[in-house]
Image (spheres, grey):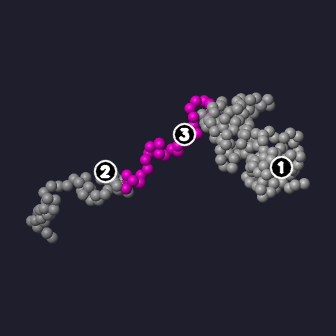
Amino acid sequence: MKTNLEISMLLLLALVFAVSCGGGQPQTLKEKELAQVDDNVDPVAHLVGDVEPVHLEDDAEERPSDSLEEVTPDVSGDVIEGHQGAFLPVIKIFGEPVKGTYTVKSVTASADIVMENVPTGVETRIDPGTYDFVFTTEAVAGNAELTLREVVIPSGRRVKRDVKFKVGKITLVTGARCAKSALKIKRKGASDWMPGKFYTCKEILLMAGEYDALRGKTPISGIQVYDGGIREILIRKK
């Protein structure tokens, strides 16, 4: 068993060793904690007990922004001011826009005309509701017509439409050296000829379907036009 003198000497040696290791300045608990923190670790996060220390340089690059502008999809292209809606139609033939007009009709038993002769390719304001839109273009023989039915126009929103006419291109030819001459064209079974001037050897744009034609006194029947088709049709002498 150690005597009191031996115990006192051991305590004195321990005190001297502690003072020499600490440089004479006792460390607080906070200082001891910070002394063990890596240079790349946020010291505040370490002291408050963050289990996974955040690396300062990586945090700035990888953590997403909380701003609404970056996390909310931009839908401003379809939103307009006011209580009306907007309609923006474009007539396309073979993927290319062409000029045309349209009439707006209410979806009622009377089908009242709301607007008419409205040019395509231009945004038009209209009261919210459900409408039929009747399109016409001179780019297609016979002032072709097409109707979009029951189109809903919401309040404060813009509705865009690509209006595709189902058309084909035909050229009536007379042989290797095509001789230009006037034509009349009509839908198969129709009583009236289409308005406009048409010629052999010249491309004609028609709605898909079957047609009859007349060259001078020569009738031409069974002319088939396909949607998206481009073809030459030989007129045979009879």
Q: Tell me which amino acid carries mark 3.
A: Ser
Label 3 near label 2: C-beta < 8 Å? no
Residue 171, compared with residue 125, is above or below; it is below
Disc assigned to residue 44: 2
Residues 120 and 8: in front is 120
At x 82%, y 45%, the residue is: 183
Confirm whether the magenta stretch covers residue 19. Answer: no
Q: Please identify, in this view, whether the residue under mark 2 or under mark 3 is nearer the observer.
A: 3
At x 66%, y 30%, the residue is: 127
Disc assigned to residue 76: 3
Segment colored magenta: 58-85
**Residue picked out by circle 1:** 210
Q: Position of residue 128 (x, y in %)?
A: 66, 32
Farthest residue, direction right? 238
Neighbour class for label 2 at 10 Å: few (<14), some, many (≥20)? few
Q: Secondary structure at mark 2?
A: helix
Q: Tell me which amino acid carries mark 1.
A: Glu
Neighbour class for label 1 at 10 Å: few (<14), some, many (≥20)? some
Q: Tell me which amino acid carries mark 2.
A: Val
Query: Is residue 175 in sight in this rendering?
Result: yes
At x 66%, y 37%, the residue is: 120
Query: Is residue 168 in sight in this rendering?
Result: no
